Image (cartoon, rainbow, N blue to C red):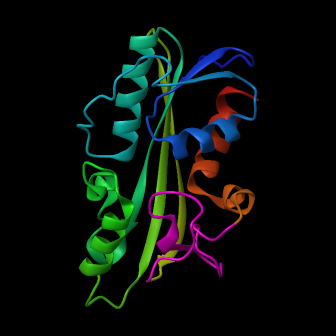
Amino acid sequence: MKPRLIKGSRLVVATHNPGKAREIAALLGGDFEVLTADQAGVPEPEETESTFIGNAVLKARHAATASNLPALADDSGLSVRALGGQPGIYSARWAGPSKDFTVAMARVQDELAHAVNRAAFFTCALALAWPDGSVFAVEGIVEGGLVFPARGTRGFGYDPIFMPEGGSETFGEMDPVAKEAISHRTRAFAQLRAALID
């Protein structure tokens, strides 16, 4: 039987990305006492897995062990079909050591210079781990396409170049509430909530 999260309990969100921390805290909706990895004094582990799920599990287990609290980790990124799924799990690394996503978005545009197909998708893997080593993981995906130049200043990461399927605004232009309604993170979180919280 899967362990469940008790509303009101303390939970570490295993990220050092402030934008991601805000989105996850919003999805948790005030049901938990949330600590970020920074607040819990948990350093970032090296991401050595080859899948989003693998890296999310690695980060969640690391944070749960280090903090002795349940820990929720996200591993997410942009996969471009014409680039064979890149940057994928290397999405943050394409932004370089300074995490400058204008650099990453420019690289995507350069790599796609001669490609007609602009289809892409965002993936979010969520893993929830407990100090005893138990872990539960899910994955959410949102399909779309890429637009250049980048549009919008909302969101973070690759949001200004990603337009969800059927949409007319990039994630960087969308109202955060509208983005949250359809995002890959929301889709993954709905599965996690249904299995472990509600």
The correct choice, above or below, for 34 with respect to 53 in the image is above
Quick check: 159 above or below 93?
below
Quadrant for the N terminus in the image:
top right
Depth check, front residue: 8 or 2? 8
Q: Is residue 17 left or right of residue 192?
A: left
Looking at the image, how many numbered discs can be counted on the residues? 0
Query: Which range is magenta?
Result: 149-174
Q: Taking the image as drawn, is residue 133 in sight?
A: no
The location of residue 181, given as percent across then percent down, is 72, 57
Horizontal side, residue 33 vs residue 98: left or right: right
Residue shown at 41%/55% (left/top)?
77
Q: Quadrant of the C terminus?
A: top right
Determine the residue positioned at 31% across, 66% down.
103
Q: Is residue 161 magenta?
A: yes
Residue 174 seen: yes
Residue in the image at 30% along x and 62% along y: 87
Nearer to me, 105 or 54: 105
Q: In which quarter of the image is residue 85?
A: bottom left
Q: Residue at x 70, y 36 (%)?
A: 194
Q: Where is residue 25 shown, x and y percent of the image?
A: 65, 36
Residue 51: % across, % down: 32, 46
Residue 140 in the image: above or below residue 148: above
Q: Quadrant of residue 104?
A: bottom left
Q: Kindly report the secondary structure that dominates the magenta region of the rendered protein.
A: loop
